[in-house]
Amino acid sequence: MWSSNGVFTRPKGTMLQTNLQLDPRPDSAYQLQLIEPFDVAALFRSLWQGKWIIMATAIFAVIAAGYYAFFIATPQFAATATVQVELNQNQAAEAYSQGFDPAQINTEAAILRSKHVLEQVVQDLDLINDPEFNRYLTPIAPWSFDGLRARIRVIISGETIVRPSENAILAKTVENLASALTTGPERDTYIFAVTATTETPAKSGLIANTLVSTYLAEQFAAKTAQTDAAVQHLSDRVAELQQALKEKETAINALISGGQLQDNASFDALSRQAIDAEERLAEAQRSLSLSPENAAHLADQIPGLERFRARLTAQIADQSSGLVALHQLRRETESTRILYTNLLTQLQHTQMQRGLHAPSARILSPAGDGRHVGPRKLIILAVALILGAAAGVGIVVWRRSHFVQRDTVGTIMGTDVLATLPYTPKSRLLNSIANSPTGKLAEATCHLRTALMLGKANANAQVIVATSSDRQDGQTIATLALAASLARLGKSALVIDANMRGGQLSGYFTSNPRPMLEHLISGSVALSEAVISDPRIAADIICTTRTDQNPADLFSSTGFAQLIHAARNSYDYVIIDAPPVVPFSDSQIIAGHADYILFCVRQGKTPTRTALAGQSALRSVEAPITGIIVIT
């Protein structure tokens, strides 16, 4: 809510949303200040004013890029060969059921770019003796970038440059070859392209075709080696099984012949005999218990039956253990024979596959001579033009934010801009003032004169000081042009060159020697004896030169005050060309005698910080700037 003193306070518990900037106050109130809007029109005016900078940077960028593209860059030619990956039955069925699988083709592409394959290409094409791939064959110029980098490395590390070993050269050559190759699959297909980019068309095609051929040969060799390894393994295993089968059959024969094993029918007859002997023994023992009178007869019969039964039982036990061992050997022999037969069949099948192998890929289209792919001169020039123009825009925007601009300097310094004067070189300044009363400089000075004479606060402005923040800011142009403009109205004007630090104004009138400003200050000459009248500006001038005395001491003296007093009485206007205020204190002293202080700045050349520093220096002696003149 608004209070009676015009301060907006935020009620407790409410959010304030506004596009106005809030300044904190000690009493927890907020004072509203308008945020300066972004002036798009001013930005475009600055870009238009800096069009020559933008054009210059764009042209420079195009020239530099053109020189690189046409005279430095090495032409590049690319040749492409296409390869189709052929799937086996299992892979094809899986691809049909699950869709396209990029793993297969990516694997093949990785194999194609493997170190082993690239080393074979390097050896086949003798690329180790090609300077394009073996950079060690090209001597390094001492003052080239690589030469300077090598020297810096030696200085930093303290180690001398040693030629790399053959293995290191080969590895670097393979690395350079890999960087010249690109492989990429066609979308949703089992076809991938192999592209080689080199400095000559024929070499590009040769490398692409050699790489693909080497890849297919490596595939065939890998499959052959795999088959040979399988054959060797199966052969060793079949030999082991054959030997084991022989050993088991020998053991069976030895068991049969050594143990005199009978067949199953004989074993059954022997079992029946044992049962019959057991029954006869039991019958004899029962008869003995029932008929004791036959004890003498049975006493001889029972021991014989017992011995017979024991003999049969022992024979049955021997025959039974032998038959178990025999059956176990026969089962093991049969298992070995089956395994042997299967492996022997697999070995024969594998041996038949030796001459039937084919690579799992084929060349779909071989590479021809390479086509030109770089440098793309038009693209390079276009990009350089865009980047150059962008750099120019960046410079202009940077200058706008760091250097004085006529549309913003008044706001930044808080002082009105009275006029904008065109910069005029020293060789043409006086002639332009004298011969062009309706020229740009004269018309712009009329604005300055009008603001000076008709401004309500400037009714009694008689002594005018023109100064700047630094050298070459154009106060001499403003001083002479203003004196000539006042003279055209019939006003008498005296121009004093107070820049004893090496100003430019006195240089316009050195052909007419007269006593200098320091002589007037010392009182050795009268005012009338020191002035120079020049018809080109219709005003009187007092020149100066460098002196051994400190200029600040001279301007602080009574003689300078008396000079200003005498000039007030003799002229309608006294215009003092003062030295820059930032590096010297002279202008701060002179400003104490002034009714009006003009502060000159150069469009796009005076740093904003320097201009503000000059303003601060004048304010420190309570001599605020009355108006600003922008020299464009």
Image (cartoon, grey):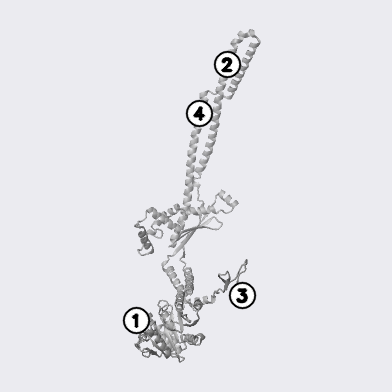
Tag 3 residue: 4
Q: Which numbered mark, 2 or 4, is in the foreground of this view?
A: 2
Residue 575, can we see it? Answer: yes
The local crowd at label 3, few if under 14, some if 14 to 19, many if 20 or more residues have their Cα within 10 Å, is few
Residue drawn at point x = 44 percent, y = 69 percent: 65
Q: Quarter-wise, where is residue 174 in the image? A: bottom left
Residue drawn at point x = 57 percent, y = 19 percent: 312
Number of marks in picture: 4
Tag 4 residue: 251
Query: What x and y, as percent, mark residue 355?
Result: 49, 46
Query: Are discs 1 and 4 less than 8 Å apart at CB?
Result: no
The local crowd at label 4, few if under 14, some if 14 to 19, many if 20 or more residues have their Cα within 10 Å, is some
Q: Which numbered mark, 2 or 1, is in the foreground of this view?
A: 1
Q: CA distance from mark 2 to mark 4?
A: 32 Å
Tag 1 residue: 547
| Amino acid beneath label 1 | Thr
| Amino acid beneath label 4 | Ala
The local crowd at label 1, few if under 14, some if 14 to 19, many if 20 or more residues have their Cα within 10 Å, is few
Residue drawn at point x = 62 percent, y = 68 percent: 11
Q: CA distance from mark 2 to mark 1?
A: 160 Å
Tag 2 residue: 308
The local crowd at label 2, few if under 14, some if 14 to 19, many if 20 or more residues have their Cα within 10 Å, is some
Give whichever of discs 2 and 1 has the lower sequence position: 2
